[in-house]
Image: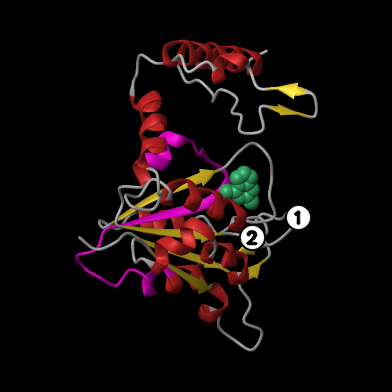
């Protein structure tokens, strides 16, 4: 099978430079994934290469025009055999979570549309939803407003790409994560606190159970810590 492909469309392609760093950068070098960034402006017409206009119905700000988006997306989806997931980043979307990351990590080709200003003319979403080889999702990363979808795309890409086989050096850590998530009976717990050397640092000791060598005790202590931390978050 081909390696999964990720396209990002933005008027600020430089925002995506972090994708060449660290594990995500290495995953590209190893051809485990392919990432391509498209400048929306390349699909803008006219002297001023404008990509936005005033909103119908009035109101503040500008709305991104549909045609440059459609042309950019069309240019990235010309395989008649291809299946495409268009991800429209918007604070009005469904909240991104780990379950969504697992699902998106199974897709062959994701296209991230990073809107700016007051968003993208909604007919772009409707148009691609009507195509048989497209799935369109509107996704938000949380209950706050960003200036555009670029940072949200970076967040979502990192969460997805680390789940792709071979990307993470130590698959045991992924295994631990996925157990808690796929097991319906297990409640969602946050991580227990971690410690490393030295055992005494600035007068603070590492909890003695972690130095005991008793693996049963350690597992029990960690579970208690996870539960206590999770409870604290809901207070
Ligand atoms: Cl996806 N976009 C913008 N502009 N703001 C957001 C967001 C997305 N998710 C949370 N806030």
Across and down, in percent, residue 32 comes to 33, 61
Q: Residue at x 46, y 14 (%)?
A: 214
Tell me if the residue at label 1 has its CB under 8 Å from ligand 1: no
Q: Is residue 121 magenta?
A: no
Q: Examine the rendered structure and indicate whether residue 81 appears above or below residue 155.
A: below
Q: Secondary structure at mark 2?
A: loop
Q: Residue at x 80, y 29 (%)?
A: 202
Residue 11 visible in image? no
Q: Which residues are magenta?
A: 73-102
Regarding residue 142, the answer to whether it shows in the image is yes
Q: Quadrant of residue 130?
A: bottom left
Q: Which residue is mark 2?
A: 116
User: Measured along the vertical axis of the image, is residue 201 above or below residue 84?
Assistant: above
- In front: 198, or 21? 198
> What residue is disc 1 on?
60
Q: Is residue 233 left or right of residue 24?
A: right
Q: Position of residue 144 (x, y in %)?
A: 68, 40
Instruction: Judge: label 2 CB < 8 Å from ligand 1.
Output: yes
Rendered image quadrant of residue 178: top left
Answer left or right for 138 relative to 79: right
Point out the tag, 2 or 1, that comes first from the N-terminus.
Answer: 1
């Amino acid at each position: 099978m081909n390696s999964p492909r990720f396209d990002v469309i933005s008027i600020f392609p430089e925002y995506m430079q972090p994708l060449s760093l660290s594990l995500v950068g290495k995953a590209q070098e190893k051809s485990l994934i392919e990432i391509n960034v498209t400048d929306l402006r390349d699909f803008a017409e006219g002297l001023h290469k404008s990509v936005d206009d005033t909103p119908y119905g009035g109101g503040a700000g500008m709305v991104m025009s549909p045609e440059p988006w459609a042309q950019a997306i069309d240019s990235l989806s010309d395989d008649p055999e291809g299946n495409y997931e268009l991800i429209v980043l918007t604070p009005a979307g469904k909240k991104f979570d780990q379950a969504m990351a697992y699902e998106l990590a199974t897709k062959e080709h994701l296209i991230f549309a990073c809107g700016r200003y007051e968003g993208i003319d909604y007919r772009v979403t409707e148009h691609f939803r009507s195509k048989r080889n497209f799935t369109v999702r509107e996704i938000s990363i949380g209950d706050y407003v960003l200036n555009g979808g670029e940072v949200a795309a970076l967040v979502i890409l990192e969460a997805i790409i680390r789940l792709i086989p071979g990307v993470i050096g130590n698959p045991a850590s992924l295994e631990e994560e996925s157990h808690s998530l796929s097991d319906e009976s297990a409640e969602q717990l946050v991580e227990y606190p971690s410690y490393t050397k030295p055992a005494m640092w600035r007068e603070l000791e590492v909890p003695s159970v972690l130095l005991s060598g008793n693996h049963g005790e350690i597992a029990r202590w960690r579970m208690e810590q996870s539960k206590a931390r999770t409870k604290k978050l809901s207070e």
